[in-house]
């Protein structure tokens, strides 16, 4: 297949591709809210930087076949650190250089075209290797054709893997529950019975109205922050403490019937809101995103109840899949399902200047890690002393 690669200019041209690019996002496996046109345009609006220490350049490329059909979108950003000067480093990456807001990032493409699209983009950029220093290439499915293409590329090194947990849904909750492990069955029994024993009743509500979503998100932000401040539970950062992350979700809330369709799942005990989780409906799949809950209700496992009720809702809507998002913690693994592994790596430009910068960057990173380890050991010794 003969493919053409072209750079587009700015979010106006990106928005014009919405119909084509969202078709690709819904053809991807697994489907991700981070691959949709709305997410990408809002991400650039709220997260791109332009200052003396860092400058982001819009670097999105389209990949089309001989008939002009879009077969892949590469939502790329070219970041310069610092913005100018002889020490400037130019790094290509996919949209998502945020603190865990974009959980998975990479090429937007149907699985059957990933290998060809990756090869075409690779050839296009290598022919312009003097324009960049290295490429942080993410979201490549393990053992897929694109993975093989990059593995065989000179100068490419794999760095890490990310696990994504995808659970298939039958047509009833009873069938779903019957096929779960003993561990999750026991957890479900406890979370529901703990409320019954104390004569507490709960209500579950899904907010999907554009007029109500902003307020629901504000409640979610408050519960997410409340959970992050809890010192007696497992450490959990507040990922929405900064305004760009909040603004991105609020932007998506203005169009809940588009792709991705934002939903907020809320659990109340009596009249009190105790747990909230954000989700994205992508055709017949549900992506469960971040959550928040009031720690004083933790002993009732309110987040387990919230996830269970969200799965019941998805089954009732005849959705096919629930994606529990990334990570290897028990809250995801105990539900079973398929583990989709994606890989991230780095491709260094073939120019001599880029290779020198890369070696210097590795040396500085190693020194920084050693300094952090030494500081940690000193603090530990001081506490024990």
Image (cartoon, rainbow, N blue to C red):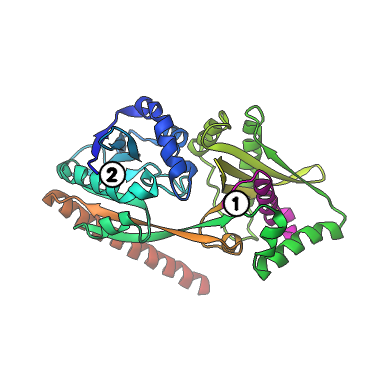
Residue 317 position within the rendered picture, expressed as x and y whole percent measured from the top left: 66, 43
Location of residue 342 (image quadrant): bottom left
- Residue 63 in sight from this viewpoint: yes
Q: What secondary structure is the magenta-colored segment mainly?
A: helix
Residue carrying label 1: 228
Could you say whether the residue bearing mark 2 is in a helix, strand or loop? strand
Q: Which mark is residue 92?
A: 2
Sequence-earlier tag: 1 or 2: 2
Residue at x-position 26% and y-position 60%: 151
Decide: is 318 above or below 359. Answer: above
Residue at x-position 35% and y-position 51%: 138
Judged from this view, the residue extending furthest toward the right is: 199
Residue 252 position within the rendered picture, expressed as x and y whole percent measured from the top left: 53, 33
- Residue 35 in sight from this viewpoint: no
Could you say whether the residue bearing mark 1 is in a helix, strand or loop? helix
Judged from this view, the residue extending furthest toward the left is: 352
Mark pair 1, 2: CA separation: 32 Å
Boundaries of the magenta span: 296-322
Check if residue 303 falls in the magenta segment. yes
């Amino acid at each position: 297949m003969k493919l053409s690669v072209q750079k587009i200019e700015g979010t106006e041209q990106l928005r014009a591709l919405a119909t084509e690019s969202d078709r690709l996002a819904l053809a991807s496996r697994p489907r991700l809210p981070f691959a949709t046109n709305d997410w990408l345009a809002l991400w650039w609006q709220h997260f791109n930087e332009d200052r003396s220490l860092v400058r982001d350049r819009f670097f999105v490329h389209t990949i089309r076949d001989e008939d002009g059909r879009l077969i892949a979108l590469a939502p790329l950003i070219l970041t310069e650190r610092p913005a100018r000067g002889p020490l400037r480093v130019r790094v290509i990456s996919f949209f998502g250089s945020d603190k865990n807001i974009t959980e998975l990032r990479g090429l937007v493409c149907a699985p059957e075209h990933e290998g060809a699209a990756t090869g075409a983009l690779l050839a296009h950029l290598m022919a312009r290797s003097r324009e960049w220093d290295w490429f942080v290439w993410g979201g490549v499915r393990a053992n897929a054709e694109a993975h093989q293409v990059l593995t065989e590329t000179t100068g490419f090194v794999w760095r890490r893997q990310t696990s994504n947990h995808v659970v298939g849904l039958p047509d009833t909750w009873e069938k779903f529950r019957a096929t779960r492990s003993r561990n999750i069955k026991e957890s479900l029994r406890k979370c529901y019975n703990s409320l019954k024993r104390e004569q507490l009743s709960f209500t579950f509500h899904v907010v999907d109205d554009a007029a109500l979503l902003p307020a629901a998100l504000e409640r979610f932000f408050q519960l997410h922050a409340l959970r992050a401040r809890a010192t007696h539970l497992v450490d959990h950062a507040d990922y929405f403490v900064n305004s760009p992350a909040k603004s991105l979700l609020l932007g998506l809330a203005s169009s809940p019937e588009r792709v991705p369709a934002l939903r907020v799942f809320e659990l109340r005990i009596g009249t009190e809101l105790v747990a909230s989780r954000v989700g994205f409906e992508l055709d017949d799949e549900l992506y469960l995103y971040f959550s928040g809950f009031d720690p004083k209700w933790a002993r009732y496992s309110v987040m387990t109840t919230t996830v269970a009720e969200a799965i019941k809702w998805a089954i009732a809507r005849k959705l096919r899949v629930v994606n529990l998002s990334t990570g290897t913690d028990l809250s995801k693994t105990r539900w079973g399902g398929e583990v989709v592994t994606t890989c991230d790596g780095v491709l260094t430009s073939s120019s001599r200047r880029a290779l020198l910068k890369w070696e210097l960057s590795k040396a500085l990173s190693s020194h920084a890690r050693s300094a952090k380890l030494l500081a940690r050991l000193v603090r530990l010794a001081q506490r024990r002393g």
